[in-house]
């Protein structure tokens, strides 16, 4: 646009690339965004409807497209997946590769603008300006825009009451878990009858949030979608930032950028036990 | 690994204002006196801290539909 070669990928370039991938069979489908009734929504583009690719947009909304990809890959492990990624999606993909939820050889990505920087003329992301907290929340709760140091500066009693104020608002909608790109467990502790259980409201606090926080260790890539999704504005991103800080301090592991296995994965890289033969009768 | 996981949890609990209530130690079955010492020390520490703030005033209300 201004003559330098850092020109952002235009919508046309992107659509052309996706069409090429679909036509040549490099990907079986492409996950991107399409404007539907005024909303940029995740959309599944396929070879069968190439004209539709003209509606592919970067979109300013964020959805965990990689989570959709993971669900599809669980059912069709051989599917070749193409998707649109921002920086946070890319970090989530790295975590999903590490945890063997997606095969990097079967995933092709197109990067779009994320956070603004001097190198980028514009950014396509809904999280550019975090919401401001109200004065009451600032007085008794935890401001979502705080730094970890600011929270730690409160004395122990105050930290406790402030966090409990936030957790008490929880309506147990599971939005944080459902939107989370790296929540892929088949069985979730948050719905396990003996651990937390489903129906009861309000949820058991702080155990509900702490269980989730612990499970974010070695997984959370700080995308902030949980906080975006939370209807009662619990500063989840801040809580998981602390989780990440401890993971770096204690385990020396950079979640989302390390290519090595997470220290929290209880499974090894190799199977060391001979599997039991499957009986014919079954 | 255990010590790392416990350190992780201690730090997380501290961040939300519940500190010093989680303790990890290694005691062999041959170290009865050490076991007594560790338990006594921890009991005293807990007594000093007072009751768990989660236990009394914040008792979990049961759901209306009987849960």
Image (cartoon, rainbow, N blue to C red):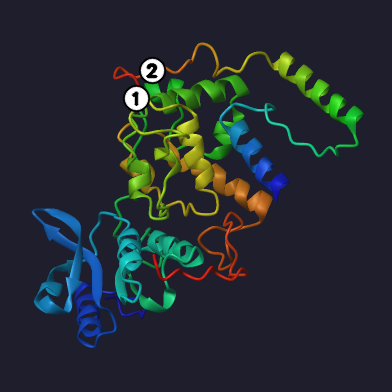
The residue beneath circle 1 is A201
| Label disc, if present, on residue B62 of the rendered structure | 2
Q: Chain of mark 1?
A: A
Q: Quick check: can you spot residue A112?
A: no
Vertical arrangement, residue A209 with respect to residue A280, above or below: above
Q: Residue at x 58, y 69 (%)?
A: A269
Q: Label 2, secondary structure: give it.
A: loop
- Quarter of the figure with the N terminus of chain A: bottom left
**In front of the other: A5 or A246:** A246
Q: Residue B6 vs residue A178: left or right?
A: right
Position of residue A223 measured from the top left corner of the image (x, y, whole percent): 41, 52
- Residue A83 in view in this figure: yes
Q: Quadrant of the C terminus of chain A?
A: bottom left
Out of A88 and A175, give the one closest to the viewer.
A175
Q: Position of residue A254 (x, y in %)?
A: 58, 58
> Vertical placement of A11 versus B58: above or below?
below
Residue furthest to the top in view is B57
x and y percent of residue A11 in the render? 21, 72
């Amino acid at each position: 646009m201004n003559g330098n070669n850092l020109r952002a990928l235009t919508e046309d370039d992107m659509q052309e690339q996706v069409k090429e991938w679909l036509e040549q069979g490099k990907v079986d489908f492409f996950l991107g965004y399409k404007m539907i009734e005024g909303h940029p929504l995740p959309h599944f583009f396929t070879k069968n409807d190439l004209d539709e690719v003209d509606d592919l947009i970067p979109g300013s909304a964020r959805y965990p497209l990689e989570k959709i990809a993971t669900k599809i890959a669980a059912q069709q492990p051989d599917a070749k997946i193409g998707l649109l990624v921002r920086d946070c999606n890319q970090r989530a993909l790295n975590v999903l590769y590490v945890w063997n939820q997606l095969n990097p050889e079967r995933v092709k990505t197109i990067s779009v603008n994320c956070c603004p920087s001097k190198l980028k003329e514009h950014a396509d992301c809904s999280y550019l300006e975090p919401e401001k907290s109200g004065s009451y929340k600032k007085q008794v709760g935890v401001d979502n825009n705080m730094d970890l140091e600011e929270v730690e500066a409160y004395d122990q009693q105050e930290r406790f009451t402030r966090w409990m104020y936030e957790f008490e608002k929880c309506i147990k909608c599971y939005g944080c878990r459902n939107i989370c790109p790296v929540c892929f467990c088949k069985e979730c502790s948050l719905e396990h009858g003996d651990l937390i259980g489903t129906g009861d409201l309000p949820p058991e606090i702080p155990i509900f949030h702490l269980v989730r926080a612990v499970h974010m260790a070695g997984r959370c890539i700080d995308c902030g979608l949980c906080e975006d999704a939370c209807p009662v504005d619990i500063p989840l991103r801040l809580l998981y930032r602390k989780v990440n800080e401890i993971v770096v301090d204690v385990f020396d592991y950079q979640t989302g950028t390390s290519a090595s296995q997470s220290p929290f994965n209880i499974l090894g890289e190799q199977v060391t036990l001979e599997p039991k033969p499957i009986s014919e009768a079954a | 690994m255990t010590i790392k996981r416990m350190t992780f949890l201690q730090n997380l609990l501290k961040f939300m204002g519940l500190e010093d209530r989680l303790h990890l130690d290694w005691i062999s079955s041959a170290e009865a006196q050490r076991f007594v010492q560790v338990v006594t020390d921890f009991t005293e520490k807990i007594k000093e801290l007072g009751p768990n703030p989660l236990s009394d005033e914040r008792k979990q209300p049961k759901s209306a539909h009987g849960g």
